[in-house]
Image (cartoon, rainbow, N blue to C red):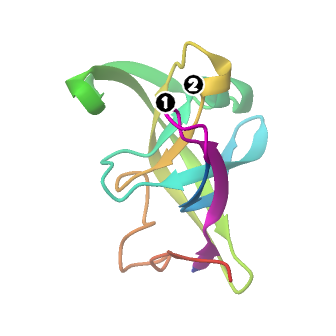
Amino acid sequence: MKFPFSSIISVEPRTGEFLLFRRPEIPVTIRGRNGSATYLGLVDTGSDNTIFPASVANYLGIDIETTRQPEASIFGGQRLHLLTGEAILSLDSEEESATWNAPICFFDFSIQGEEMVILGQAGGSIFSNSSPRPLTARPVS
């Protein structure tokens, strides 16, 4: 599957100059008991876990449980406790689509505006050679 990179304009904090970043963000649909919703997910090949906001699990009726593991490490070594659950994920591109059951981690973001979706190694066959096929992000001309 191929997806274009998203273009993000940001401000350089020291100079105030505008910067253009290209990010491998793709639309991913997650399904639960109460329906489905599509979010932009950041493809992160360095992340072990696929992580959605806990609010998504609550909204879609996905059962989540508190466990001792897994935890996630973020920059600075800070450890975050993750909740776990299972959901159906779907990817759709212009040429093809893929749907699979996935173990998902959920995190209770303290500020709603900081919620994000991380598409990591676990959580599905996004990066594997089995179905669905590996995805690639390509720059948009």
Left or right of residue 125: residue 112: right
Query: Crowding near pointer 2: few (<14 within 10 Å), some, many (20+)?
Result: some
Q: Compared to 32, does 20 lie above or below?
A: below
Where is residue 47? Give x, y as percent.
33, 48
Query: Crowding near pointer 1: few (<14 within 10 Å), some, many (20+)?
Result: many
- Identify the image quadrant of residue 23: bottom right
Who's the residue at 60% across and 29% down the image?
115
Q: Amino acid at mark 2?
A: Ala
Mark 2, secondary structure of its residue = helix
Numbered label attached to residue 1: none
Residue stretch in magenta: 2-17
Q: Please name the residue that numbered disc 1 is placed on.
A: 106
Q: Compared to 65, does 101 lie above or below?
A: below
Farthest residue to the left: give it.
77
Farthest residue to the bottom: give it.
95
Mark 1, secondary structure of its residue = strand
Q: Amino acid at mark 1?
A: Phe
| Whether residue 16 is visible | yes
- Identify the image quadrant of residue 54: top right
Q: Please name the residue that numbered disc 2 is placed on.
A: 54
Q: Earlier in the sequence, mark 1 or mark 2?
A: 2
Where is residue 31? Give x, y as percent.
68, 46
Q: Compared to 141, does 122 lie above or below?
A: above
Left or right of residue 53: residue 32: right
Where is residue 120? Give x, y as percent.
40, 52
Left or right of residue 10: residue 34: right
Farthest residue to the top: give it.
110
Total labels: the figure holds 2
Between residue 32 and residue 41, name the one nearer to us.
Answer: 41
Picture quarter with the C terminus: bottom right
Between residue 47 and residue 101, name the one nearer to us.
Answer: 47
